[in-house]
Image (cartoon, rainbow, N blue to C red):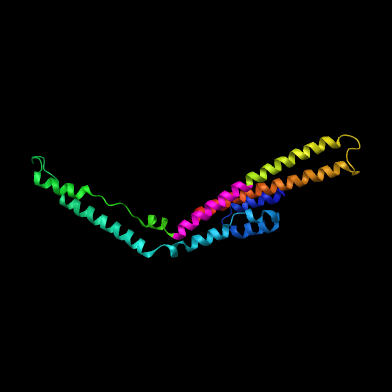
Amino acid sequence: GTHYTLNVTSNCQNKTMKFCKNLQQIVEIADPEWAPFWTNYKMLKKLIKELPSLVPADEIRRADSSLSSRSNASGSQSQNIEPQSETAGPPASHNEPSLKKNTAKKQPKTTPKKAMGKSPGEIAFFKLLHSELKKAAKFFDRTKQEFLLREERVRDGMEIIRKPNSIMVPDKWSTMAKSIYRLYKDLLLLELYAIMTYCSFSKILKKH
């Protein structure tokens, strides 16, 4: 149990290992009741691969043309403004409106990143990411509360079996040890769930 958890933690930091395959193996050997609550890393990874093809081409072209037009406008504006000599007087009044006209209106910035942020693929990715995070947080909190109740039940059971003839089984301490070991294994599994969930979100955001 503990050795396996430590191995998984180190493997999470190993760049050469296929994280998705490792996560799939853990889901298969873990408690079947937990299967729906592991992070859907495979689907998130698939959405990231599909993002470039889901960005509308016309939006990217508009963003690129907007960037080029702004750079051209700034270049022409810098050419219109000539350095003044030290002996020259104040600029002529008829030049002021032209300068104001060049600087008055500023077009809103539209970059390819903003265009991608509005794409259906990007929206779908972050919706799924938020849903997975919400699912994981709810499951972890609920399971932690269940384990706190189990710990309290084990402690109460230990107080009961201290009394003579308190339970029907002959080897009462062996029975109690089995219940403690079972709780310990489940706590290790919850720790493993937290580690793998953290790694899932960390890795998928680095890939994004």
Instruction: Identify the residue shown where x is 55% and y is 60%.
Output: 43
Magenta stretch: residue 66 in it?
no
Out of 17 and 44, give the one closest to the viewer. 44
Q: Position of residue 178 (x, y in %)?
A: 81, 46
Quick check: 48 above or below 154? below
Q: Is 112 located above or below residue 156 in the figure?
A: below
Region rendered in magenta:
120-139
**Closest to the observer: 148 or 177?**
148
Q: Give the residue drawn at x 55%, y 52%.
A: 131
Secondary structure mostly seen in magenta is helix
Residue 172 position, x and y percent, is 87, 42
Q: Is residue 143 above or below residue 45?
A: above
Image-based side of 75 in relation to 89, left or right: right
The residue shown at (53%, 59%) is: 45
On the question of residue 17 being in view, the answer is: no
Indicate the position of residue 141 as horizontal and vertical percent values.
63, 44
**Residue 77, image x and y in percent?**
19, 52
* Observer able to see residue 98: yes
